[in-house]
Amino acid sequence: MTETPSSPASEEPRRNFMTKALAVVVGSIVGLVPIIAGAITAIDPLLRRRNSIQGTDDDGFLKVTPASSLDASGAPRLFPVIADLQDAWNKFPQTEIGSVYVWKNDDGTVKAFTARCPHLGCTVNYKPNQQRFACPCHDSSFNLDGSRNNDIPPRGMDPLEAEIRGGDVWIKFEKFRAGVHDRIPV
């Protein structure tokens, strides 16, 4: 067998290969740094809490209405809950984030329920002549204590913490998942 010597001009010198390989690695790293930084900046709002309610006090309470606006007879009244809402990228100042029924008991304490039906999330109406809450989406109704009158909704109305401070009604507003038996905040 005869071997033909290969010409030295066709072989790539090792030094030249290592230089090119190092240039590719360094160039890739330099190119990826701004891409990764840009991706983190773009995704950062999504990694934060999705919807944050601003304007609450340290305990999470929101001012809903002056206590003087509650019905003197003790009947529930519907009040909007207004706060600044911050989603991933946008801020919505003074937005209605929900509504609550609030009334004063005979002992002077304040009672509050979210106005959303726990069945499908419809807004519940108060029927003063029947002394109950009724859902217009189906035939569900609730007593003044929030308990359900039939088995259509999976649970009673969702109570909220409420108190009077400085002549104003403050509510710890939460939204709950509809259609499930347990009260799961969303």
Image (cartoon, rainbow, N blue to C red):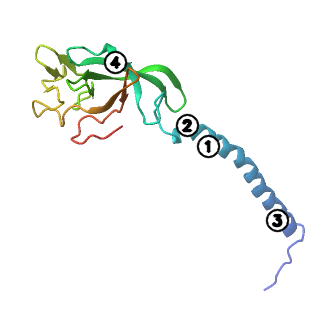
Answer with mark 3 or mark 4, whichever residue precedes in sequence.
Answer: 3
Q: CA distance from mark 2 to mark 1?
A: 9 Å
Q: Quadrant of residue 169?
A: top left
Answer with mark 2 or mark 1, whichever residue precedes in sequence.
Answer: 1
Q: Residue at x 27, y 40 (%)?
A: 183
Marks 2 and 3 in Cβ contact (< 8 Å): no
Q: Assign the N terminus to one quadrant of the image.
A: bottom right
Which numbered disc, 2 or 3, marks the residue closer to the eye?
2
Q: CA distance from mark 4 to mark 1?
A: 46 Å
> Where does the image place residue 98, in percent across and percent down from the top left?
35, 24
Secondary structure at badge 2 equals helix
Answer with mark 1 or mark 3, whichever residue precedes in sequence.
Answer: 3
Secondary structure at badge 4 equals helix
Image side of residue 175 versus residue 84, left or right: left
The disc placed on residue 67 is 4
The disc placed on residue 45 is 2
Residue denoted by label 3:
18
Tell me if mark 3 has few (under 14), some (14-19) or many (20+) residues whose alpha carbon lies within 10 angstroms of its own: few
Marks 1 and 3 in Cβ contact (< 8 Å): no
Kindly identify the amino acid type of the residue bearing the numbered disc 2.
Pro
Q: Residue at x 22, y 22 (%)?
A: 124
Answer with mark 4 or mark 1, whichever residue precedes in sequence.
Answer: 1
The disc placed on residue 19 is none
Image side of residue 66 versus residue 130, left or right: right
Kindly identify the amino acid type of the residue bearing the numbered disc 1.
Ile
Residue denoted by label 1:
40
Marks 4 and 2 in Cβ contact (< 8 Å): no
